[in-house]
Image: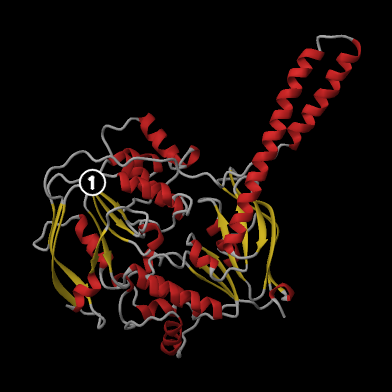
Amino acid sequence: MSNSQNPVILSFDTVSFAYNDGKKPILVEANFSLRENTKITIMGQNGAGKSTIFKMITGELKPQSGKINIGQGKSIAIAKQVIPRDMMHMTIREYFATAFAEKDYQLDKKIAEAFEAVNFNMPLDKELKELSGGQQARILLAYALIQKPDILLLDEPTNNLDTDGINHLIGFLLGYDKTVVVISHDADFLNMFTDGVLYLNVQSHQVEQYRGDYYNVVEEIAHQLEKAKSLNARMEKKIVDAKEKINFFAQKGGKMRKLASKMRDEVAEAEENKVEVRRDDKTITPFTIEFENYIGPIVTIHSVELMNKEHERVSKKLELELKKGMRYQLMGPNGIGKSTLLKRLINAHSGDATIHDEVRIGYYSQDFNALDMQMTVWDALHEMSNEVTDQEVYKTAAQFLLTGDLLKQPIESLSEGQKGLLCYARFAIQKPHLLILDEPTNHINFRHLPVIAEAINNYKGAVIMVSHDDAWVSKLDEIEEVDLGRLLNE
């Protein structure tokens, strides 16, 4: 039986939902249905409500009207973007135990099976906070799989995964014979297995459903956008031409005046025929991260602490000095210690590494733990410089699509993509001497990535980063690689 003949496993029936007492609508009488054993992508602008739909499917949020239908007896599990902070103190075994309502005496065996599915191995008494971002990503997926759900929800599953991890995940999903719904900004990954797309229209708050692989759907949506723009251009020309004639005929008498009246009706009809063009093609505008000149070394590294395959810490010599205009990318498998090295650099004044005096650091953390989640967006921007004016904050925020009520909201209320854009907006105000970028494309809509690459290419300061997004890194100029995997094996 083909997927198109499979029974419906999940549907939204005229579902409406809004935040902030109805002031921020996400869905307005939205309808869609998913069939068993299909692989579906959810698309939409940052903040359109993709993660909100997941929360409604899992029951964490309830629709304010309409109905969500789930096949009788069908189970759901979600691989979230991040492990909850209040669970980071748990061991791996303790964390997986929370997936079950009652004590499971086969837990270790089930964890081993889930680990095999995600190509992962780690002692079960290891605490979650000791794991790298890539290792945590595999834990999150295994946590969902251990529940053996009929509907598997994946929220940005490739974030922090290295190339081997992404390839293994693709292979797993292609062979997974259950329903999978994915939120991701990794276009190449999505195109490998997608059967169709649910597209969240941020203006109409409807969910549009498309069949076909990811790139074909993106192309179809782009074509619809151009068609809408073309239709509106024709209608606008017709309206302008008609109004000029109306003004002329209205001043005449008899039949001319009647013709003017008729043309007014045609203008009204043309206005009605204009269609609202999607805003989802909107990207952040080109921006600059200024570098206020700094003379001499910005960062000096003498040694690094890495993790070997036996999960033992090993110190290795690494002589590295960053000055103005120098850019380094740390390479190596998940868990070797790339993100740990970046975190240690933030306040590095030890024998191993030193951030030199007066250096301003711009830090993009893969889990945004460098942001104060209780702070408003406005304050988070303002705190980056004592000299920035209110007008400059408004202007910068608008460049990164952080407008209106968003500025008054606490950072924790933003979508993950909006948090990422906030980080770049902060850099634009801060004018750092050094950018420390830990997975700087995580959560960012693919439309924004070329703009960010251009800004980093034009940046005159020093950059040290970790990224598994090879396509994006290839757009950056003069990046030198530091292979920590080879260093570990020397």
**In the rendered view, would you say 245 is above or below 85?**
above
Q: Position of residue 301 (x, y in %)?
A: 14, 60
Viewer-nearest residue: 347 or 315: 315
Viewer-nearest residue: 387 or 228: 228
Tell me the quarter of the picture where residue 471 sits. Answer: bottom left
Tell me the quarter of the picture where residue 334 sits. Answer: bottom left
Q: Position of residue 8 (x, y in %)?
A: 71, 71
Residue 136 seen in the current view:
yes
Residue 155 seen in the current view:
no
Kindly identify which residue carries mark 1: 461
- Crowd rating for badge 1 (residues with CA inside 10 Å; few <14, some 14–19, many 20+): many
On screen, residue 317 versus residue 161, left or right, reads left
On screen, residue 175 versus residue 341, left or right, reads right
Tell me the quarter of the picture where residue 215 sits. Answer: bottom right
Viewer-nearest residue: 189 or 97: 189
Residue at 31 percent of width and 83 percent of height: 123
Q: Position of residue 326 (x, y in %)?
A: 21, 52
Q: Secondary structure at mark 1?
A: loop
Residue at 69 percent of width and 75 percent of height: 3
Residue lying farthest to the left in this orientation: 351
**In the rendered view, would you say 130 is above or below 380?**
below
Q: Position of residue 2 (x, y in %)?
A: 71, 77
Q: Amino acid at mark 1?
A: Gly
Q: Quadrant of the N terminus?
A: bottom right
